[in-house]
Image (spheres, rainbow, N blue to C red):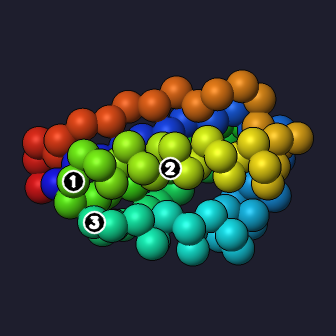
Amino acid sequence: MYGTIRRYKVSNPKAFSEKVNAEFINIVRKVPGFISYVAIDEGNGNWASVSLFTTQEGIARSDQLAAEWVAKACPDLVSGPPEITKGPVSVK
């Protein structure tokens, strides 16, 4: 199992969460090897997502799709590229 964490700086966490819930979740669920996707509003404009996949290719594709979606769907809500942490899950 592999995971990716993307941390964003957003101007309106509620609006960003609503867009992710309405649009992006349906995109990421179609990535082969998808296991789960959750998001955390960390406060102060910090927002993070955690995705799990069965393969490294899944997390790479998820990161790519997320970047494309943010650029197209809500560039006005996100400041700069996300901080990304990814790799094999070491504790289950």
Residue under circle 2?
49
Q: Position of residue 52 (x, y in %)?
A: 31, 57
Q: What SS does tag 3 mark? A: loop
Q: What SS does tag 1 mark? A: loop
Q: CA distance from mark 3 to mark 2?
A: 17 Å
Q: CA distance from mark 3 to mark 1?
A: 6 Å
Residue 4 is left or right of residue 63, and the answer is left
Q: Answer whether residue 47 is visible to the viewer in this image.
A: no
Q: What residue appears at the point 45 percent right and 72 percent down from the top-left corner?
A: 30
Q: What SS does tag 2 mark? A: strand
Q: Residues within 10 Å of mark 3 (few under 14, many from 20)?
A: some
Q: Amino acid at mark 1?
A: Thr
Checking the image for residue 33, the label placed there is: 3
Q: Amino acid at mark 2?
A: Ser
Q: Quadrant of the C terminus?
A: bottom left
Q: Position of residue 72 (x, y in %)?
A: 78, 49
Q: Residues within 10 Å of mark 1 (few under 14, many from 20)?
A: some
Corner quadrant of residue 35: bottom left
Q: What residue appears at the point 53 percent right and 56 percent down from the top-left corner?
A: 39
Q: What residue appears at the point 71 percent right and 46 percent down from the top-left corner?
A: 70
Q: Residues within 10 Å of mark 2 (few under 14, many from 20)?
A: some
- Asked whether 90 or 31 is in front, the reply is 31
Q: What residue appears at the point 56 percent right and 68 percent down from the top-left corner?
A: 27
Q: Work out whether 88 lies above or below 34.
A: above
Sequence-wise, which precedes: disc 3 or disc 2?
Answer: 3
Q: Mark 3 and 1 residues: CB-CB less than 8 Å, in contact?
A: yes
